[in-house]
Image (tube, helix red, strand yellow):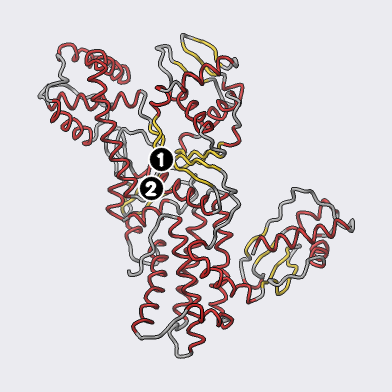
Amino acid sequence: MKNQIQELLLQSLAELESKDILSTSNDILIKIENSRSPEHGDFATNLAMTLAKKNKINPRQLAQKIINQLPKSEILERVEIAGPGFINFFLKQDSHQATVVKILKNGHRYGDSKIGANISTLVEFVSANPTGPLHIGHGRGAAYGTAVSSLLRKIGFNVSCEYYINDAGRQMDILALSVWLRYLQHNDVKIPFPENAYQGDYITDIAIALYAEYAGKFVLPTEKIMPLFEEKAPELKIDGLIKYCIDNLGEKYYRIIFDAGLDSILTTIKNDLVGFGVKFNNWFSERSLVENKTVEKCIQKLIKNDWVYEKDGAQWFRSSKLGDEKDRVLIRENGQATYFASDIAYHLSKVERGFEKIINVWGADHHGYIARVKASMQALELSSDRLEVLLVQFATLYRGKEKLQMSTRSGEFITLKELQEEVGKDAARFFYIMRKSEQHLDFDLELAKSESNDNPVYYIQYAHARICSVFRQLSEKGINYQQAEALKHISKLNEAHEIKLLATLARYPDVIENAAITYEPHQLAYYLKDLANDFHTYYNANQFIVDDDIIRNARLTLIEATKQVIQNGLSLLGVTAPEVM
């Protein structure tokens, strides 16, 4: 509907310009909003007020000129001026009623559009270091990234989802060391465990599995290990232990321990994500960027283009020349590439694989990383405009009024799997996307589990189940319902609650489009809550299985259309639509 009204306004403006009454620019933004109350119509625009000052015309007078030049339309009942110059649009009743036909005809395709123009789009999200199970913070990024991907597909983007596996670098070496030390302890070697190693029980589980296959194989003399624990600086201590482990075990044995930790945790991550309804088209290995020389190729190109200089034995990228707050190290003094060097290569890979639009979903703590990545793309002569970074705040978990503490390194955290087991996948997925991604989220476990109207996902699912119950009753009573025949009577949908519900159903395509292009799935969540409220209000005020065949069939088509839209919307958010509750 908004697109049709926008086209009417564009024709009106063109007519006014042709008569030299008005001057506009080619890139004029026509903003059309849903009206807040029926008295103000179905839609409204502030177009006259935005053009009035430039054209030195009173806004209300300009609004009237715009209305006078509107072409005739089959969807409009009337158009009025309100307040300082708003233009309110009232739709004909049969325009809303036609929405039912459109919904039932298109089914799950209702709301589809082609504005994405099949643009090849890569959405990378979660990408947690494989150093432990996914926790509740990762869950929000998973729910958000999946919802954004689904919405973009819905409006015509060709979307691929990717998980970037950070399977190289210092944190992975700390993981391998942690497994090895627990392995030694399981071999009855009396040895301390560093406080900044990974502490969780899952490390012990990996070590025990390693022991079962390689008992005693990776044990080294303790007299050379123990002095390393005397180092007072925690980070120097752990680096010294990593070096000792690598040097004395050798590459072959160290890689067995490294891969045991990586493979075990990555398998857990993949299984947890599948259980959470999150599927990736590709799992991309950071290590592959080193092995196939992509990192080296990037650095050589940056050197050739004079974006790299040497200082204190390290190689630095001149990122401050391209908008970053300071220059960044690419190669450390020990010759090892930094995470940033790998990230540069990774983004080059994304472009080389043909993605026209690149979307990264990062934790909010990575905000400062955006400028340097965009700077690296510019230095590689790639368009940084194709990269969009969406930030997600971590979630704080509450059980009642108790805030649950979490520390990844110490192993004191609630995993994503544990969260699902307690509240269920549907509640977890829905609650995660109920706020803007960059806003802080307090996740209330008790509310998520409650079967009450205060629980939004329960409230929405209950609306769907209620509709299914009506159709079961219909069947039990032996009443015949033929959709095609029933649609002939939708003109009877003129009661106040029906008109309200029809108007909300008609909004769905606009909500989908706006939620997709702004990367805000919470808009769809709130729409579904509004739709459920309109249905429950209608349900409580009216009977559906009445004696009058015409009225009954008209109402059944309306609630069937409502059921379809609830299904469609919940599906985009990764939430089921149960038939019984």
Q: Where is residue 316 in the image (x, y as percent from the top left)?
A: 51, 16
Q: Mark 2 points at which residue?
A: 278
Of the numbered discs 1 and 2, the one sitting upstream in the chain is: 1
Q: Residue at x 19, y 35 (%)?
A: 205
Q: Distance between the residues labelled 1 and 2?
A: 10 Å
User: Relative to 43, is 17 above or below?
Assistant: above
Question: Does dot 1 land on a helix, a strand or a loop?
Answer: loop
Residue 198 coordinates in the image, percent (x, y): 27, 30
Q: Is mark 2 on a helix, strand or loop?
A: loop
| Residue 364 x/y as whole percent | 47, 38
**8 or 221, which is in the foreground?**
8
Residue 424, placed above or below residue 347: below
Please state the horizontal and vertical placement of residue 87, each as a whole percent of the image.
73, 65
Tally the marks.
2
Q: Quadrant of the N terminus?
A: bottom right
Name the image quarter holding residue 42.
Answer: bottom right
Q: Is residue 418 left or right of residue 452?
A: left
Q: Residue furthest bottom?
A: 547
Q: Indicate the quadrant containing the C terminus: top left, top right, bottom left or bottom right.
A: bottom left
**Badge 1: residue crowd in 10 Å (few <14, some 14–19, many ≥20):** many
Residue at left offset 59%, top offset 75%? 97
According to the image, label 1 marks what residue?
Answer: 126
Locate residue 534 relative to residue 14 in the image: left or right: left
Select label 1 or label 2 by which is in front: 2
What residue is drawn where x is 46% and y is 73%? 560
Q: Quadrant of residue 222?
A: top left
Indicate left or right for 131 with 303 as reference: left
The amino acid beneath tag 2 is Val
Q: Do the residues labelled 1 and 2 touch (CB within 8 Å)?
A: yes
